Amino acid sequence: MIPTLQVGDRILVEKLSLGFNVPFVEAKLGARMPSRGDVVVFAQPETGKDLVKRVVAVAGDTMELRDGQLLINGQLLPRRLLGPARHFDYDETQDRWYQQSYQAWQESDGKATFTTVSLRPSGGNFGPVKVPPKQVLVLGDNRDNSNDSRFWGFLPIERLRGRALGVVWSSGPDGPRWRRFFHPID
């Protein structure tokens, strides 16, 4: 989710607005559809591992990614080039931090405005796909390096654990990142 979240961020998750998970079973009481633009925490369908991604399409929406630009129901989301950006990432296999260069974009879905990054100048392609009932489509803000709906499909709303609200602690290659403490997640 770089740049919205950084490697080493610990986040606060609000769990009640999307329904209540029933312990020990795959069930949710009062499951509610999140909104486009929400950053959500969920159990990944294939592995059950908790992931954090942005909801880009909800039930009934048709979503397409064309040359890196997001289309929802045939309408291009406004997008503006911000320019080059660099962020730290962590390679778990080599146990080392490294800096990655990206192209940064500002996107807006009318309700939320957020920054995405891409390694490729033209971005990628995906879809069009129509989101089925009681499901959402999620993408990472790091569009070229994200394990998201493009790879494992739609996300049933029962798998949602909550909405990410803010960063409560952050630690990077040089120790605590004080400026990120209590940083809201857009």
Image (tube, rainbow, N blue to C red):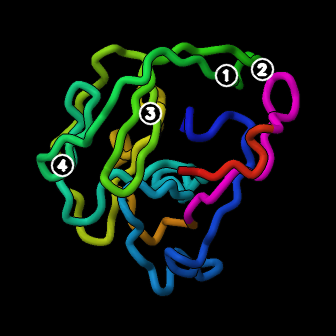
Q: Earlier in the sequence, mark 2 or mark 4?
A: 2
Q: Is residue 79 left or right of residue 115?
A: left
Residue 87 pos. (x, y %): 62, 22
Helix or strand or loop: what does disc 2 sit on? Answer: loop
Residue beneath disc 2: 95
Q: Amino acid at mark 4?
A: Val
Q: Nearer the viewer, mark 1 or mark 4?
A: 1
Residue ID for mark 1: 88
- Determine whether, in the image, residue 87 is placed left or right of residue 37: right
Quote the CA–CA distance across marks 3 and 1.
Answer: 15 Å
Nearer mark to the viewer, of 2 and 1: 1
User: Mark 1 and mark 2 in contact (Cβ < 8 Å)?
Assistant: no
Residue plotted at (31% across, 22% down): 123
Return the disc, 1 or 4, that comes first in the chain's sequence: 1
For the residue pair 18 and 86, the one nearer the viewer reads as 86
Badge 1 crowding class, 10 Å Cα cut-off, few under 14, some 14 to 19, many 20 or more, is: some
Q: Is residue 157 above or below residue 52?
A: below
Q: Which residue is mark 4?
A: 129
